[in-house]
């Protein structure tokens, strides 16, 4: 009797799970019906959300943890430039660029693995070598650039500094796209340079943080992607590896929409608590 009862319970549980399994199957089937570009975008965003979650959780947990300063004479000589906040935000356009450039799924996945790998390496440094950034106060929020800097400071605590993942990710993407699509790669290199400089001028990172991030980005590219990308480029026609360069313009459109969204928030009168110096 116990065996019969157990069998009945298992059958009932299986019936209860059928709708869930069917929904998952429908979701997978729907995903495969999407255009290739849409699939790549969804995969990219999914991985980036996981990576962002890793960063934001630790950033919140360690928000009040003391850390060392890596400020040198060059850091003190570089002024705080709030008008570089849009350049810092350009990072969020660069990290989705692979989805609009790399068509070959294997290469795209290798690029996304690079994001995960860099985040894991950075988390080890964040845990074992805590650096805390000394930030200036924001004197006003009545100008958009100062408002954007205040928002950046509120969303991102002055920890998880060394190495700079902004610099690492931007340089890594620029290196990957440079090999596969030179026109897109040049634009990505310029954008990466803007991001790297803005991490310093917005006082989000010390120069040492940013230098370490650049090294991490290049090391990840050469260790994980360089050989594979060059081999695939020699084996397959370019149209099978990458999308036409004009497809990358979607990244600029999305970036423009993001800036417009935050400008509208600023215009609506949204203001934050005063942002005081953090030494």
Image: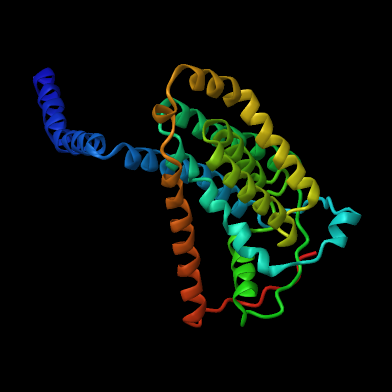
Establish if 182 lies above or below 11: below
Q: Quadrant of the N terminus?
A: top left
Establish if 148 lies above or below 219: below
- Would residue 100 appear left or right of 24 to someone viewing this image? right
Residue 249: percent from the left, percent from the top? 45, 51
- Would residue 271 appear left or right of 17 to someone viewing this image? right
Q: Quadrant of residue 272?
A: bottom right
Instruction: In this rendered view, identify the residue nearer to me: 7 or 164.
Output: 164
Residue 67: percent from the left, percent from the top? 78, 51
The residue at 41%/37% (across/down) is 243
Q: Quadrant of the C terminus?
A: bottom right
Establish if 217 lies above or below 86: above
- Residue pushed farthest right? 73
The residue at 52%/42% (across/down) is 51
- Would residue 185 appear left or right of 6 to someone viewing this image? right
* Display coloring: rainbow
Instruction: In this rendered view, identify the residue nearer to me: 114 or 225.
Output: 225
Q: Quadrant of residue 254?
A: bottom left
Residue 198: percent from the left, percent from the top? 69, 57
Residue 92: percent from the left, percent from the top? 53, 52
Q: Is residue 46 visible?
A: yes
Q: Is residue 130 visible?
A: no
The residue at 53%/45% (across/down) is 95
The residue at 43%/42% (across/down) is 100
Q: Quadrant of residue 30?
A: top left
Looking at the rendered structure, the number of numbered marks drawn on it comes to 0
């Amino acid at each position: 009797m116990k065996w019969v009862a157990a069998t009945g319970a298992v059958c009932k549980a299986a019936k209860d799970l059928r709708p869930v399994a069917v929904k998952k199957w429908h979701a997978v089937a729907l995903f495969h019906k999407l255009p290739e570009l849409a699939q790549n975008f969804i995969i990219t965003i999914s991985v980036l959300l996981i990576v962002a979650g890793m960063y934001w959780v630790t950033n919140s947990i360690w928000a009040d943890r003391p850390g060392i300063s890596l400020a040198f004479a060059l850091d003190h000589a570089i002024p705080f430039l709030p008008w570089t906040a849009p350049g810092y935000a350009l990072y969020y356009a660069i990290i989705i660029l692979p989805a609009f450039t790399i068509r070959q799924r294997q290469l795209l996945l290798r690029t996304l693995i690079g994001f995960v790998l860099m985040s894991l390496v950075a988390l080890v440094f964040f845990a074992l070598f805590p650096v805390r950034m000394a930030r200036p106060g924001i004197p006003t929020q009545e100008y958009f650039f100062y408002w954007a800097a205040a928002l950046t400071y509120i969303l991102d605590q002055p920890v998880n500094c060394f190495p700079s993942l902004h610099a690492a990710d931007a340089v890594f993407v620029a290196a990957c796209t440079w090999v596969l699509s030179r026109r897109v790669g040049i634009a990505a290199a310029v954008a990466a340079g803007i991001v790297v400089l803005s991490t310093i001028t917005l006082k989000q990172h010390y120069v040492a943080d940013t230098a370490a991030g650049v090294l991490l980005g290049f090391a990840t590219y050469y260790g994980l992607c360089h050989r594979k990308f060059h081999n695939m480029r020699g084996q397959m026609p370019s149209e099978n590896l990458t999308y036409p360069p004009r497809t990358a313009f979607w990244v600029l459109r999305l970036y423009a929409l993001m800036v417009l969204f935050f400008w509208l928030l600023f215009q609506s009168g949204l203001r934050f608590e005063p942002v005081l110096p953090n030494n």
